[in-house]
Image (cartoon, rainbow, N blue to C red):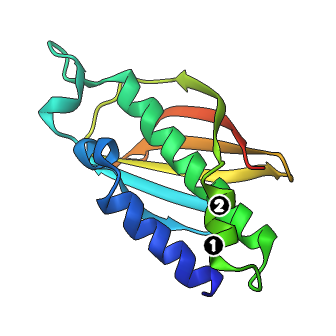
């Protein structure tokens, strides 16, 4: 299977088969080995501060972590190369996970749509690091984060 086909399959899986992400409404809209994008729309179930209608900080952290994790997965796939058997790629991906996540909340989470982007800072054999940002539909920076992920 080609890297691009595998990445498309992962995107579809994340959008339809991960119950928590599905409940939050997270949608992987773009990703490759250097950057990713995850979007979701406001819904009342995501409120953290009801009187002010502000997004829950846990939703923000989850969306940022998802964007970081996705770009890290794509970087792992690219590092393994096109000739790596699919079952070996899947076995390697199943070992990936978040080691550390730092989120800085800059503004209250207000908006109708939220866009999280992530880029790779470093992708090694054992650990990868991603930088993430979350903006609303008006381009206001709501939060940013750094994620460290185990990849091997």
Location of residue 2 by image quarter:
bottom right
| Near-viewer residue (12 or 136) | 12
Residue 108 appears in the picture as rendered: yes
Residue at horizontal 61%, vertical 33%?
Answer: 145
| Residue 39 location (% of width, % of height) | 37, 53
Q: Is residue 127 left or right of residue 95?
A: right
**Can you identify the residue that label 2 sits on?**
91
Residue 28 seen in the current view: no
Tell me where residue 26 appears, x and y as whole percent: 33, 50
* Residue lying at 55% horizontally and 77% vertically, measured from the top left: 6
Residue 119 appears left or right of 61: right
- Could you tell me how far apart the alpha carbons at marks 1 and 2 are, in whole angstroms? 6 Å
Instruction: Establish if 88 lies above or below 150.
Output: below
Q: Quadrant of the N terminus?
A: bottom right
> In the rendering, at what x and y percent does residue 43 appear?
16, 39
Residue at screen point 41% across, 32% down: 60
Residues at badges 1 and 2 in contact (C-beta under 8 Å)? yes
Task: Name above or below for residue 4 compared with residue 51.
Answer: below
Asked if 24 appears above or below 54 in the picture, the reply is below
Numbered disc 1: secondary structure: helix
Which residue is situated farthest in the right direction here? 125
Name the residue rendered at 39%, 25% in the picture.
Answer: 58
Q: Which residue is mark 1?
A: 87
**Which label is found at residue 43?**
none
Q: Residues within 10 Å of mark 2 (few under 14, many from 20)?
A: few
Q: Residues within 10 Å of mark 1 (few under 14, many from 20)?
A: few
- Judging depth in this view, the residue of 145 and 66 nearest the camera is 66
In percent of width and height, residue 33 lies at 68, 66
Number of numbered tags placed on the structure image: 2
């Amino acid at each position: 299977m080609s890297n691009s086909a595998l990445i498309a399959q992962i995107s579809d899986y994340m959008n339809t088969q991960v119950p928590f992400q599905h409940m939050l409404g997270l949608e992987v809209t773009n990703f490759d080995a250097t950057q990713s994008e995850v979007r979701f729309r406001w819904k009342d179930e995501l409120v953290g501060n009801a009187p002010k209608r502000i997004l829950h900080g846990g939703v923000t952290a989850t969306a940022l972590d998802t964007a970081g994790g996705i770009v890290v997965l794509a970087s792992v796939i690219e590092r393994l190369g096109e000739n790596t058997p699919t079952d070996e790629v899947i076995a390697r991906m199943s070992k990936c996970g978040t080691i550390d996540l730092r989120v800085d909340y800059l503004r209250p989470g207000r908006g109708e749509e939220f866009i999280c982007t992530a880029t790779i800072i470093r992708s090694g054999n054992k650990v990868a690091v991603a930088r993430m940002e979350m903006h609303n539909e008006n381009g206001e920076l709501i939060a940013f984060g750094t994620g460290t992920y185990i990849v091997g």
